Amino acid sequence: MTADQLDALARRTPTNRIGTPDDIAATAVFLASREAAFITGQAIAVDGGASSLPGDFSAYLTGSPRKDYG
């Protein structure tokens, strides 16, 4: 991807950045630690919050009308 494409992708995530291998590694290290001993059977999204909002996140950034999921 070009730098412009990466910037556009980053702007569509709540954290406003692209994830790094270190982000994935930190999650893996945590899950392998004693602190995560009581976590079982979970899917953990390491995506900067991109999957936490319904629909297209760019609508939240631009102030577009939000879809009612209620």
Image (cartoon, rainbow, N blue to C red):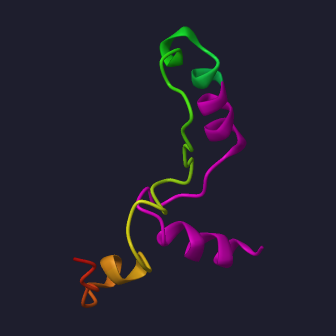
Extreme residue in the bottom direction: 65
Extreme residue in the front direction: 41
Residue in the image at 59% along x and 32% along y: 27
Of residues 14 and 36, the one nearer the viewer is 36
Could you say where residue 8 lies in the image, as x and y percent from the top left? Answer: 57, 76
48 displayed left or right of 21: left
Could you say where residue 15 lies in the image, as x and y percent from the top left? Answer: 43, 56
Decide: is 32 above or below 58: above
Q: Quadrant of the C terminus?
A: bottom left
The number of numbered discs placed on residues in the rendered structure image is 0
Indicate yes or no whether the magenta region holds residue 53.
Answer: no
41 displayed left or right of 62: right
Could you say where residue 59 lies in the image, as x and y percent from the top left? Answer: 35, 83
Indicate yes or no whether the magenta region holds residue 3.
Answer: yes
Of residues 41 and 11, the one nearer the viewer is 41
Decide: is 2 above or below 49: below
Most common SS among magenta residues = helix
State which region is magenta.
Answer: 1-28
